[in-house]
Image (spheres, grey):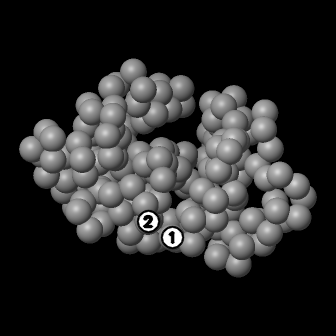
Amino acid sequence: EKSLAMNFVSAQKMVEIARNKGLLLMENFMFLYHQQHQLVKQLIKDGYRVGIMKPISCGPDSENDAILLKNKLKLKDSLDLISPIRHKLPLSPYAASLRLKQKINLKKIFFAYKKLSKKYDYLLVEGVVCVLVPILEDYFVADLIKDLKVPTIIVARAGLGTINHALLSIEAL
């Protein structure tokens, strides 16, 4: 695996900026086998009510994280509640909605979030790739995060451009 940063000072700076913004910075490493997935499974085992939500999914069902996590965690919530906006095209939500001629109804997302957050002790809300991905022409993932008022974890990929990507994400939030 490649590291999050080229050196300790760079990584420390990224963590400091994230902390100052109230964010958690982490690398993305095989989510289903990582500690977070194990923690969710442990919370469920310990009797906590844990739910998931992926407000918007774009791409085929075979690559849909909401479906994968629903099955892995054996959740009984409907897919329409877990992922209220789904497009089969692997594009940004806005581009997919234009191509498919389907409007994105943000009220469906807010309704699902409100219902799920009341039902569970912990609700994991997964984003849509990057915080500056457009959902509507003038509404981005960062806007959805702010409107839902959810604590945010930035998952940074390992590789070239990670520092830039992570810092731009932090700045956008």
**Position of residue 78 measured from the top left corner of the image (x, y, whole percent):** 32, 36
The N terminus: image quadrant: top right
Mark whose residue sits in front, 1 or 2: 1
Where is residue 48 shown, x and y percent of the image? 61, 47
Residue farthest to the right, as pictured: 8
Q: Which amino acid, by three-letter code, is at mark 1?
A: Ala
Task: Identify the secondary structure beneath mark 2.
Answer: helix
Q: Is residue 86 left or right of residue 127?
A: left
The residue sitting at 51% across, 70% down in the picture is 172
Q: Position of residue 54 (x, y in %)?
A: 41, 45
As shown in the figure, which amino acid type bears the numbered disc 2? Ala
Examine the image and state in which quarter residue 57 appears. top left
SS class of the residue under badge 1? helix
Residue at (42, 36) in percent of width and height: 66
Of all residues, the one furthest to the bottom in this rendering is 20
Q: Residue at x 66, y 31 (%)?
A: 30
Q: Residues within 10 Å of mark 1 (few under 14, many from 20)?
A: few
Disc marking residue 142? 2
Q: Is residue 118 visible?
A: no
Per the image, the residue denoted by label 1 is 172
Looking at the image, tell me whether mark 1 or mark 2 is earlier in sequence order: 2
Disc ID at residue 47: none
Pick the front one: 50 or 33: 33
Q: Residues within 10 Å of mark 2 (few under 14, many from 20)?
A: many
Up the image or down, 150 lies above or below 5; here it is below
User: Which residue is drawn at the image coordinates 67% and 51% (left, top)?
Assistant: 162
* Front position in the image: 138 or 105: 138
